[in-house]
Image: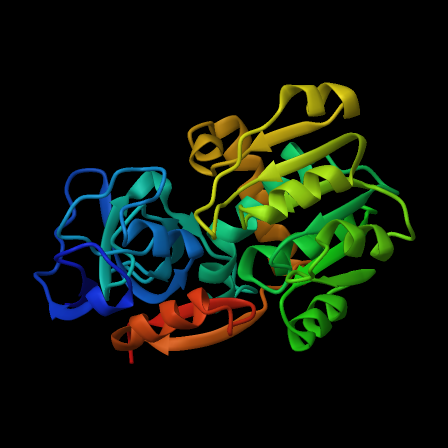
Amino acid sequence: MKAIQLQEFGGADAFRFVDLEDPVPGEGEVLIEVTRCGVNFADTHSTRNDYLAEQQLPLVPGAEVAGRTPDGRRVAALVGNGGYAQKVVVPEALTIPVPDEVDDEQAAGALLQGLTAMALVKRCARIEPGETIAIEAGAGGTGTLAVQIAKAAGAKVIGLASSAEKRELVESLGADATVDSRSEDLRAALLEANGGEKIDAVLHMSGGDAFDAELRALAPLGRLVVFGNASRESRQIDSGVLLHGSKAVIGFWLIHVLARRDLAVPLVGELLEALATGALRVTIGGVYPLSEAARAHEALESRVSAGKLLLDPTS
């Protein structure tokens, strides 16, 4: 089979399009012939080995796939690593049947980021009708889904994005207002977008100065949910600031939801139902041949892409 493999950690220049032996399923496992693989910002961390989980070489990146089993069933799965390939083996118990109403692109594009967006909005931010939520990378894979989920929950949604085209996309998905994520004074821009009022919740993934600005923009009892660190610039938190403003800073890593079936199973069911009924839609920003995975990563890291990026191992 064809796959993307790294023999050394690095960026897209470390990618190699190689021939590997087909994986062989063991007891309780199933082979998936991959039709689409999702590209996530977390993949850019794993290929550099600066993600939350330690990576091992040689590495085939890719955490989410959609495809078919040898007996013809359409399934999706989260695989940890190994998704940038034509075939992957996963435990049968972890495969998710894909409804007929959901195509492979929607299934692969929604699984990891859809579950993330649902958990961020509903469990971590605990958004209530009438509250305001600001969503970083609103035009990205997770952001486009979080905007829709938060809007459906009755929130006022402010999307952050780095270009006019991306902000237009975020508004088309239902955002009430948008902010240039590269604003010189991000706190002031957020308050202006919210009519001068502070914000109830923020979904934060950039790190660096934006964290400080958004924490200061939070209203009393506000929640800042950290689900990434794209800038790779971490911040320390003054507990006095949290006490003075009755603010909460919450970290989120999807693996802890997936480890609890009582949380993961209802979220998966809710996600698939929303996709099947059209209540939630993945914004596909581009589908790249598997051999051009490096180009997909470059588009993601340079922020020129919008929506969800996918790989097509069949082309």
- Marks counted in the figure total 0
Q: Is residue 240 above or below residue 112?
A: above
Q: Point out residue 38 in the picture as x, y percentages from the top left corner.
A: 41, 61
Q: Nearer the viewer, residue 112 or 215?
A: 215
**Residue 195 x %, y %:** 92, 53
Q: Residue furthest left?
A: 21
Above or below, comparing residue 26 to residue 113 in the picture: above
Residue lying at 81% horizontally and 61% vertically, measured from the top left: 177
Going by the image, does 232 lie left or right of 24? right
**Image position of 303 (left or right of 32):** right
Q: Nearer the viewer, residue 280 or 31?
A: 280
Q: Residue at x 57, y 43 (%)?
A: 269
- Of residue 200 and residue 286, the one placed in the foreground of this image is 200
Percent position of residue 303, x then y: 51, 68
Q: How far across and down, in percent of the image, does residue 266 sit?
A: 58, 36
Which colour scheme appears in the figure? rainbow
Asked whether residue 270 is in view, the answer is no
Nearest the viewer among 140 and 265 is 140
Q: Residue at x 12, y 57 (%)?
A: 7
Q: Residue furthest front?
A: 184
Residue most extreme to the bottom? 315
Taking the image as shown, residue 271 lies to the left or right of residue 36, namely: right
In the picture, measured across the screen, residue 301 lies left or right of residue 242, that is: left
Where does the C terminus fall, quadrant-wise?
bottom left
Looking at the rendering, in which quadrant would you find the N terminus? Answer: bottom left
Q: Can the viewer see residue 309?
A: yes
Task: Give the quadrant of residue 147.
Answer: bottom right
Residue found 86% across the figure and 52% down from its top: 194
